[in-house]
Image (cartoon, coloured by chain):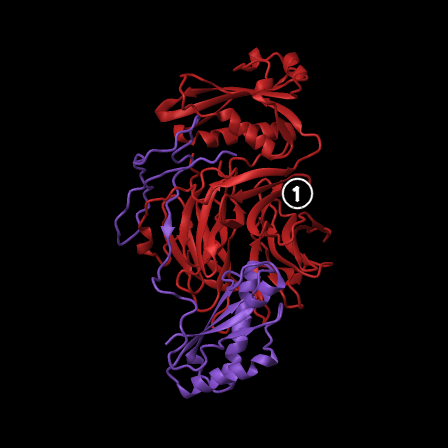
Chain colours: A red, B purple
Amino acid sequence: MTATSTNTMKPGILRTAACVLLLLAPAGAHAELEIDITRGVSDPVPVAVVPFAHAAASDGAPDVAAVVEHDLASSGRFKGLPRAAMPAQPQRAADVNAAAWHAAHADYVVVGRVAAGDGGTQVLHFDLVNALTGQRLLNDESVTVPQKSWRRGAHRIADRIFEKITGVRGAFDTRIAYVAVDGTPPSQHFQLIVADADGENAAVAARGSQPIMSPAWSPDGEWLAYVSFEKGVSVVNVQRLSTGELRQVSARAGVNGAPAFSPDGRRLALTLSGTAGDTDVYVLDLATQQLTRITDDPAIDTEPAWSPDGQMLYFTSDRGGAPQIYVAAPTAKARARRISFGVAYAARPRVSPDGKQLALVEEEGGASYIATLDLASGNITTLSHGNLDESPSFAPNGAMLIYAGRDGGRGVLATVSVDGQVSSRLKSAQGEVREPVWGPFTN
Amino acid sequence: MKKKHILVMLAVMAFAAGCSSKPVKEAAPAATPVPAAGSNSGVQSGGVPTVDIDQHQGSTQGGATGPSSPLAAQRIIYFDFDSSDIRSEYVDVIAAHARFLSGNATVRVRLEGHTDERGSREYNIGLGERRAQAVKRALMLQGVQESQIATVSYGEERPAAAGSDEAAWSKNRRVEIVYIN
C-alpha cells in the first residue's frame, strides 16, 4: 500500500534530537475537520451505495459503503440514496433489479462485499450497475488493503466509481496537510496536521509554540516541507511523515521560507533573504546542497511554484509595484516575465497538475479571493467569494481546489471545483485552520 | 460528519546518533478507545509520529527591553498599509534608540517586523523583513553598528491584536525593537 519512494534525500543537517517520538495526544482534540457541502451542482446524480456484505458478521465491521457514499456526495456531483429508501440489499450485480432501483430514483447502484484476504488483508469486492440500462459498468472489481486501512480501500472504490461515471480521475484516496492554531496572540499553539482528504484520520505531524507555515508535499507524498519559527527565526524543515525523521534543510541568516519540492523531488525552491533582508527565490539541490539564485533584485520575490515538467518557476514579485505573478526558468540569472495582468494584486501562484493554469490569490478593494489564471490566454477567473481567501492548492486530479477562508472570524478551509460549481467548507471544532495543501496521488 | 476520537500510543524511541528509518511500531492502545459502530479507531493510513519542534523554553518574543534602557515604553514603530516607510512621528523614537545604542556598543537589539493579515503569508514575511530593514538602516545611519542589530520577520503570523478591521490591522503593522541583552 505504501508507495515506494525514490531516495532522493541525501543526509543534510540531521537533527537527531527530533527523532524522539512523543505519545500522540488524541488527534481529535482540535485537529479533526467537519465538512459541509455549501454548493453542489443543481442536479446531482443519484447513486445508491448499498451497505457492503461482510464474510464474517461482526459489530465492528467497517462501513465501506458509508465512506464511498460520503466521498461521492462530497464532490457535489452525486447524491446518495438514503438506506431507508433502498428496495433491497444485494451484494452482487447479478442480484440487482435495475428497474426496482430506477423506480427508487437511483441512476446508479453500487454493491459490494468484504472478505478476508491473505496476511491480515481485506478484499473489498464491488460492482457498479447502471440502474437505467441494467448494464454492469464495473464488474467484480476488488481492492485489497491491510485490515486497518479499509478507509483507503473505500476511497479507492469511490475513485473508480467517480472516474467511471464522470471520466475524471477521482482524488478521494489522497491526503491533505494544514496548520491548526489554538489560543490567542501572543500565546498560541501551532500544529501541522496530516489527514485524509475527507478530514478523517487527522494526525499531528509537528507542533510547537512558534508559528508553523507554508507546508508543501514531496511528489511521492512521503515528506512535508514547512517553515518553522522554532528558534525564533524562520527555518525550513523537511519531515518524513511515516517516521518523524526531521531534517533542517535551510537555516540561513535571514528569511527561510516558501519551500516547494520540484516535480522530480530532487530540488527545493525556496525564499531566502540573507542578512540584507532582500527576499529572493532560490533553488536548493537536496543531494548536493548546491544553491542557485533565481532572482536578484530589491523587490520581494517569493512563493515559488514549479511547472509539472520542472522547467519553469512561477513566483510572486512586487518589482512592478504591487505583487504580481512572474515566471522564470529555474536557472541562475534567468529572465523573469510577468504573466498576471488586469488585476491590481496577484500572489501565491500554484500550478495545476496539467500545467495549463495557475491558482492564485487576487486582491481587490481590500478583500482577497481565489482565482485561476489560464496560461494560454492570460484570463483570470475569480472562483471564491469570501473576504480573506488565500492559500489555494489543487487536488492532484486538477478538478478541485482547497483553500483557506474565514468564517465567523475564524480560519476555516474550503474547497471549490475548478469550474466554480461545487464548494464545501471544512472547519475545526475549536481553534482555527489554515494553509491547506493537497497531497499527491500515491496509488 | 461524526467526529471520532483517535487514540494512538507510540513507543518512545531512544536518541541515536543517526535517525533510524524503521517505521514506528504501534503499541496496542492502552486507554479505552471511544467505541463506535464500524469503528475506525486506531491508525488507518499509517502512523504519523508527532515531532515536537519547540526548542526554546524561554520567551523568544517581546523580551524585556534592556534594564537600563529609558525607552521601554516606546519601542514599537507602526507602519501604513503595504508600506515600509518610517512615518515622521517615529523619527524621534528611532533617534532615541539610536543614541542609546551608539553610546552602548555592547547592547544588541532584535528588530521584529510584522504585517497585518491582508496579503499572502510569505509575501508578508518579505514585507515584515522590509520594515525591519528600514528601521535597521535608520539606526545604522545614526551610528549604530550593524553587529548590534538583528532582524527577523514574522509576517502576519504573530499579530498583536486579533480582529479583521483597521483597528486591529493598524496595531499589527509594526516593527518591535527588542533588546536582547
Residue A156 position, x and y percent, is 51, 31
* Residue B37 falls in image quadrant: top left
Element assignment for label 1: loop
Residue B145 position, x and y percent, is 44, 83
- Residue type of the residue flagged with mark 1: Val
Look at the picture and state if A307 lies above or below A318: above
Which residue occupies 52% across, 81% down?
B93
Look at the picture and state if A242 lies above or below A183: above
Look at the picture and state if B109 lies above or below A241: below
Chain to which the residue tagged by mark 1 belongs: A
Viewed as shown, does residue B126 lie left or right of A192? right
Residue B170 position, x and y percent, is 59, 67
Q: Dot 1: within a 10 Å radius of its alpha carbon, few (fewer than 14), some, or many (20 or more) residues?
A: many
Residue B151 position, x and y percent, is 47, 72
* Residue A70 falls in image quadrant: top right
Which residue occupies 41% across, 47% down?
A205
The front one of A137 and A332 is: A137
